Image: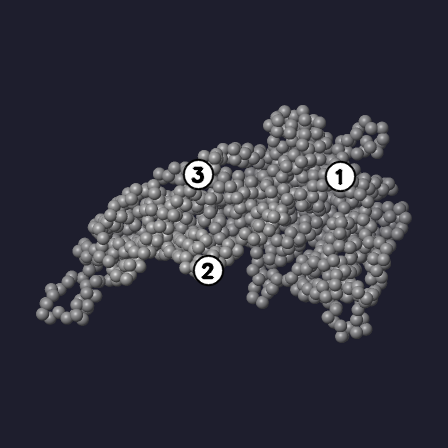
Amino acid sequence: MSLPLHLRSYREKSKDELTRDFYNVPTQSSLPGPSDPPSVVKLRERPYKNGQEELQSMDINAVISVEGKEEVYAGRLSLLPPYLCFISLDRKSCRCTIPLYTIRRVERLNSRAGVFALSLATWHGMRIILQLTSLLPTAEHFAILLRDALKSQLSAMKQLKPFLPSLYSEFLLSSPVSTATGQQQTNDLLLDAESNDKAASSSTAAASHEGEGDLRGPGGEGKGIYQRGLGEQFGFPGDARKMRERSKMKLWREYFMIHGRNLTLLRYPPFQRLLQVGLPSRLRGELWEVMSGSVYLRFANPETYGLLLSQNAGKSSQSTDEIEKDLNRSLPEYKAYQSEEGLARLRRVLVAYSFRNPELGYCQALNIVVAGLLIYMSEEQAFWLLEVLCDRILPGYYSPSMEGTLLDQRVFESLVHRCLPMIQEHFVSVDVQISVASLPWFLSLYINSMPLIFAFRIVDCVLAMGVKVLFQIGLAVLKINGEALLEVTDDGMFINLMRSYFATIGDSAHPDHPDPRVRAITNFQELLVVAFREFNVITDDTITAERKRLRAIISDEIEKFSKRAAVRNLKNIGKFSKENIGIIYDHYFSAICSPEAGPSTYTSNFSPGDQFDQPRIQVDAQGRVETRIDHRTFRVFLSQIATWAREETVTTNAFMQRTDRKVADHELIDRLFFAWDSQNQGTLSLQDVVLGLNRVMTAGLMESIEWFFELHDKDKDGFLTKDEVIQLSESLLFIFRNEPGDIYLAAVSKFILNAYEFGDATAPEGSVDEKAPIDGDKETASGARERSNSSAGPHNLPYLNLATFRMVVLADELLENFFANDLTASFQLVQTEDEDYHQAHQKSEGLLGGLMNLVVTNENKNRLNRLADGFGSALGRHAEWRKPALSKASDPSITPSSSSDLRARESLLTPAQQAGQFQRQRSASAVSNTSTKTTDTTGTVTPEEKRSLADVELRYREESQMVKAAQEAVMHRPNFAIDAIGDSDDEDGDEPEEGDDAGVMDEVEAFLKAHGADDEGLKGEQKKVAEDLLKAEPMGAKKKEKETADLVDL
C-alpha cells in the first residue's frame, strides 16, 4: 500500500503562491517554457534551463480606470508573470487578471507632474489606464519589470489568435446580427444599440436570434467552432423560459462589450450581481474556466489532453477499473449519460486525469463532479478545470487518504460550534455526526444533493468567490432548518430531513404570504441570502486559520490509521510481535520522510503516466500502489536500526554534552540492501525489510554465520573467493571500527590468517596450485615470493566453503561471541519520537510563537553548538570521541558476555599508542555510562505517556466509514423534477416579454442588498485626475525616437 508521505512534506505556501492562488493564476514553474515539449506528466516544479531566469514579481499601489466607464478604483496592482492582476481596496468592487500575452500596446501617458500613468491596449480593443501611486523610482522599476515580462510573451501572443475561437463569447460578439430588413450589422452597430430605448433593445434581441442560435440548446451545430458541452446536444437542465436565459444572455453581452471578455474580463460590481442570479447555460462553461483560472492552463498546454489519450489508449489500471464501475452511476437521470456518447466523454476525461495524476488516480465522487462539468464544458475544458479543483480549490479532497475532505469536515464542525452552538450541543447530546450529511455536500459540490439548476449556481459562486461558499451554504442550510434539527434524534432522521429540504428547495419560502413578491421568493433564494448576509463573516482567512489549527490533528490520525493498515496487510511478520512491526514501520516511514534520504534515485522502466510523479511511490502493472525505498533511503533506515550503520560522535564542552549522528556508508550496507531485494526491483518494500530483519535478529550462532557468509557470496555458489574473503574481513573491520582496544583488530587479523590457512587445505581442485617440493639449499627470497604468488592462484575462483568458514569463526572466541550475541544485539528496535509527529512539530502561532519560530531554527542551533565548542576549547574542556557500536554498557539489559573476559591478545600498537588508547578507552567508558543513563531516562515510557490509540483509531475509523458512506451516497442521487429539460426560451419564435429584463435585474438588485450598495470608486479630485488621463496623449509623441524606453509596442 502507499503511505501518506505528503503529510510530512507539507509546507505552508509562500507569499507569491498565496497571491497567485487569490487571483487563480498558476505559478511560473508549473507552466511549460516556450521551447519545452508538451508533457503529459504533471509538472511539480519546472527547473529553469541555462540562461533562463524566473521573471520577477512586484506589487504596487495603483488606480485603475477603463475608457467608457466612469468608475475609478484605487487598489493593489500585482505583476505575477505572465499575468497582470488588480484588486480594489475593498477587495470586491473591482478585480481583474490580464495575461500579458493579451496586451498589444503599453504607453506612458503625458500627465501632470508627479503622476506616473500607463495606458494598456488589450487584444479586444479595451483601453485601461493604470495610475501608479507610488514613488517615482518604484513606479519606473515596475514599468521596467513589466516591459521585460511583456517581451517574454511574444511567442505566446502568436498562439492567442487560434485559441480565442474556442471561447463562446468570441462567437457571441463577433457573429453578425440580422435586422428586420435583412441587412447585416456589425459590432459597432451593436454598441450603438445600447443607447436605444427599451423597445428597440427588445427588437434587436429578438432579431438576433438567427445569428446567435438557440441560447439554451440543443442546437448551434455548425455555428462557430467554440468548445461545446453535452448540453448543446442533449439540452441543458431546467426550463430556459422560466430561467430567463435570453435576458441573462443579453445582459452578459452588454457587459462584455464594455468590460472585456474571456481572457481580458474585468470584474466590476455588475459582474457579481449577474453571477448570483445564475449564468446563462451557454456561457457557464467559459465563465467557469475564466473564474477558476483553468483557461490559462488550457492555453499553455494545447496538446497535453490529446497526448494523454493517445499515449494511454488501451491501458488499464486499478483506476480505470474503478472508473468503469462508476460510469453508469454518474447523473443517470440526465439523458446524455444514458447514451454511449456521454459516457464515452466522461470516461475519457476521468481516465486521462488518472494517468495525468496517478498519485490521486480516481476517487468516488469525481465522476459526479466531472459529469456535471461536461454538461457545460468540452472534454478538454473539464479536464483542466478538474486539475484546478483537485490541486488548488479543493486540495486533498480526492486523494487516497482524503485528508482534505476530513480536514474541512473538522473545520465545518468547528464553525457550526462557533456560529450555531445550540445545534452543535444537541447533536453531541444525541450522538449525531454532522459529517454524515455534510460530507456528500462538499465532495460533490452539492451537485448530488439538490436539483442541478440550483447546484450549478452554487458551483458558480464557488469558482468565483472560493471554497468559503461551501461552508457558508452548509451553515445556512443548518440555520434555516434549525428548529427541525433540534428534534433530530439519530443520523437517519438527520439525513431524511436534509433530503426533504433539498427536494423542496425550488418551492416558495413563504407560500401563504399575502404579498405576491414575497411569495415569489424561493427556498433557494432564501438560502443564498442567509449564506451571504448572515455568514459573510466566514472568509478565506477564517478557513485558512482553521485548517492550519486542525491540520496537525488530522494528519496524525491519518498516519496512525495508515500504520495500523500497513501492519495488518503484511503477509508475513516472522517472529516479530505487532509492537515490533509497528516500530519497524515507524523507522521505515521516518527514513522516507527524512531530509537525509533526499530525492528518490529510483528510475522506473514504465512509461510516463504509469507511475507516480512522487519519489518512492510506484504503481505495478496491475495498478496497485506501493511505497518502496531506494538504496539511499535504506542507508538512513538502517542507521536508525543498526548501531554500526551510523557514526555517533559524542562532544563535550564546558556547557553541555551532545551526540551528533551521521549515516555511515560502506559496501556492507549495499550488500544488505541487494540481499533483501527479493524481487530484484532496486527498491525495498516494507515486507522485504521485515523479512530481512527477521532473519538476522532471530538467528542463532550458526544461522548468523551462514547469513553473513551468504551476504558475501556474490554468485551464490556456496564458496567465497579470495577477494570475497578479503571483502568479508573488511566488513568485520567496518563493524568493529569504533570499538575500544585492539582485540577486535587482532581477531580480524587472525581470521584472515586462519581463512587462508584452512582455505588452502579445503579449497576445490584448481583453486590452488600444487606446491612443488622446496629445496632449502637453493631457496632464495625472490624465489619464495614468486612461488608464493604462483601458488595463490586466481582470486575469483571458489576458495572457502561455508563449513570451513564456520570452522574459522569458531576458532576465535571473540568472533564466535560476535556472531552468537553481538551481531543480533546490534539491531535495536527502539521506539521513535514520531508519536503525534505533526502536533509535536506544529509551529506556534501569535507574536511570541512567530518570534520563537524565527529564533529556534536548525541553523541557529548549529551556530550555538559551534559557539559552545569554541568556548570549551578555550577552557580546555572540549573533547570528541566516537561512540562504540557493540559496547555492552550501552544497554544494561544485556548480560555481559564472555567477550569482556577474553584472553588479552598481543598488542599491535607501540607502548605510546597503547597509553593513548587506554586513556581514550576510559573516556569512552565514562561517556557510555552517561549515555546509558540518558537512554534509560528517555526510553522509559510511563503509562500516562503511552496512552492508548483506541480513541484515535475509533475516531478515524468512524470518519473513514462516513467517507465511504458519503461516497456511496454520492452515487445515489435523487431525481428532481425541476431539472427536466424544458422548452426553448424562444419556442415558436415568440419575442421575449418587455418586462423580462427588468425582472432579471429586480432579482439582481435583491441580492445586491445583501452585500450593501455598490462602491462607486474614487470621487472628487482623484476621479478628475483619472478622467484627465483618459484624454492624455502618450509621452514622446513628438520625440518617439529619443524616448523609446517609455514605449513597449508588441
Disc nearest the viewer among 1 and 2 = 2
Residue corresponding to mark 2? 870
Residue at 83% x, 65% y: name it. Answer: 112
For residue 982, what is the image quadrant? top right
Amino acid, disc 2: Gly
Left or right: residue 97 versus residue 918 is: right
Task: Give the vertical position of 314 relative to 160 (above or below).
Answer: above
How far from the left and from the top, in percent, is residue 723?
28, 59
Q: CA distance from mark 1 to mark 2?
A: 63 Å
Disc nearest the viewer among 1 and 3 = 3
How far from the left and from the top, in percent, is residue 1050?
72, 66
Q: Which mark is residue 533?
A: 1
Residue 397 appears in the picture as rendered: no
Image label count: 3
Task: Give the vertical position of 1042 relative to 595 (above or below).
Answer: below
Marks 1 and 2: CB-CB under 8 Å?
A: no
Viewer-nearest residue: 258 or 597? 597
Left or right: residue 667 versus residue 1007 is: left
Q: Residues within 10 Å of mark 2 (few under 14, many from 20)?
A: some
How far from the left and from the top, in percent, is residue 170?
75, 54
Amino acid, disc 3: Val
Secondary element under disc 1, as helix, strand or loop, is helix
Viewer-nearest residue: 334 or 715? 715
For residue 106, what is the image quadrant? bottom right
How far from the left and from the top, in percent, is residue 831?
43, 42
